[in-house]
């Protein structure tokens, strides 16, 4: 009598296992409280693109290629105020330079991922998803489950941001100006980054940049943002570091990689 081989487990939806989908949706739930702010801010950015006289398609295109709301707003505002192209581009580059700092924190989190996953997740990273990923990574020692969790954090957040900008470009200024929604960006940033400010250089950079942006708010072409970012980084570099717990303390999992 021959023994029938055990039936292999049925794959979940789209050939992805149930565990991976569970981890993905856990990540999506972790970032969900920040999604409404992303949608509202996306609506404002989309409307700003049209108001500045730029083609409507540029709003979702910029959001899907740049994926950095603060720099997108800064460069469109600069162009709308007829700022020199050099200032507009320099402001966007300086604002986005923070992503290079995120990479240092995310490197140990991504260390055990295959290259294709590193590239996909790096492309989807935003301020909010990077902060949530770094803070939650210690709870996911298995690299396979960790990368699906991070995909759930970053993918849906970028999707609602792109959808919001497309809707804003199509619908126009549907958000009243008196709402002053500019506060949404620092509010979202503060919500996710305050728990991550665990050493003096990070606290100093955030505090100095915020103070400079507010003090120089009357500068034209959004130069207050450019000055705040530069001074925050420059001065914080001289602040002595006090050792604390960070994502860098995570040891990459050395177990064999499990294909997904």
Image (cartoon, rainbow, N blue to C red):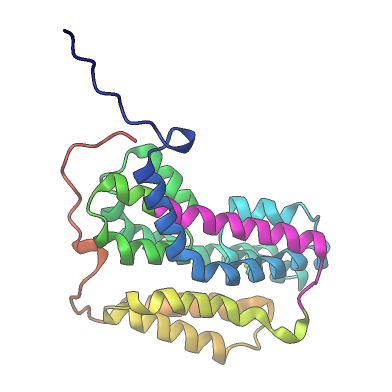
| Image quadrant where residue 83 sits | bottom right
- 238, above or below 53, in the image: below
Q: Could you tell me residue 122's position as x and y percent?
A: 43, 50
Instruction: State the residue in front, 215 or 14.
Output: 14
> Taking 28 as reference, is 247 left or right?
left
In the image, residue 144 above or below residue 88: above
- For the residue pair 253 and 6, the one nearer the viewer reads as 6
Asked whether the viewer can see residue 238, the reply is: no
Residue 95: x %, y % from top left: 52, 68
165 horizontally vs 16: left or right = right
**Residue 134, how many percent across, how many down?**
33, 63
- Image quarter where the C terminus lies is top left
Q: Is residue 165 magenta?
A: yes
Residue at 71% over, 84% down:
179
Q: Residue at x 77, y 60 (%)?
A: 169
Residue 171: name its quadrant. Answer: bottom right
Residue 145 vs 204, above or below: the answer is: above
Residue 32 shows in the view: yes
Residue 119: which quarter of the image? Answer: top left
Q: Residue furthest bottom?
A: 215
Q: How many numbered badges does the structure rendering display?
A: 0
Q: Which residues are magenta?
A: 150-175
Q: Does residue 229 appear left or right of residue 173 in this picture?
A: left
Q: Percent position (x, y) of residue 5?
A: 23, 18
Q: Residue at x 26, y 36 (%)?
A: 258
Q: Does the magenta stretch mainly form a helix, a strand or a loop?
A: helix
At a point 78% along the width and 80% down the height, the residue shown is 176
Instruction: Tell me, yes or no, whether the highlighted magenta stretch contains residue 148.
Output: no
Q: Is residue 155 above or below residue 214?
A: above
The quadrant the N terminus occupies is: top left
Q: Check the image and name the residue furthest to the top.
A: 1
- Tell whether 86 sits left or right of 14: right
């Amino acid at each position: 009598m021959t023994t029938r081989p055990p039936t292999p487990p049925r794959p979940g939806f789209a050939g992805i296992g149930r565990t991976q989908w569970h981890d993905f949706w856990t990540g999506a739930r972790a970032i969900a409280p920040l999604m409404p702010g992303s949608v509202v801010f996306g609506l404002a950015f989309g409307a700003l693109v049209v108001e500045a006289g730029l083609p409507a398609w540029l709003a979702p295109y910029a959001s899907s290629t740049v994926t950095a709301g603060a720099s997108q707003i800064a460069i469109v505002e600069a162009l709308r105020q007829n700022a020199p192209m050099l200032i507009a581009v320099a402001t966007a580059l300086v604002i986005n330079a923070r992503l290079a700092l995120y990479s240092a924190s995310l490197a140990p989190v991504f260390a055990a991922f295959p290259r294709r996953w590193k590239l996909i997740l790096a492309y989807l990273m935003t301020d909010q998803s990077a902060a949530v990923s770094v803070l939650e990574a210690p709870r996911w020692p298995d690299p396979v489950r960790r990368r699906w969790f991070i995909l759930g954090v970053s993918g849906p957040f970028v999707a609602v941001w792109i959808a919001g900008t497309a809707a804003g470009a199509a619908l126009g200024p549907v958000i009243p100006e008196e709402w002053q929604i500019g506060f949404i960006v620092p509010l979202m940033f503060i919500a996710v980054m305050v728990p991550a400010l665990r050493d003096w250089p990070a606290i100093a950079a955030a505090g100095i940049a915020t103070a400079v942006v507010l003090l120089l708010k009357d500068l034209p072409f959004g130069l207050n943002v450019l000055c705040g970012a530069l001074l925050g980084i420059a001065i914080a570099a001289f602040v002595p570091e006090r050792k604390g717990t960070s994502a860098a303390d995570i040891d990459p999992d050395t177990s064999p990689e499990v294909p997904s």
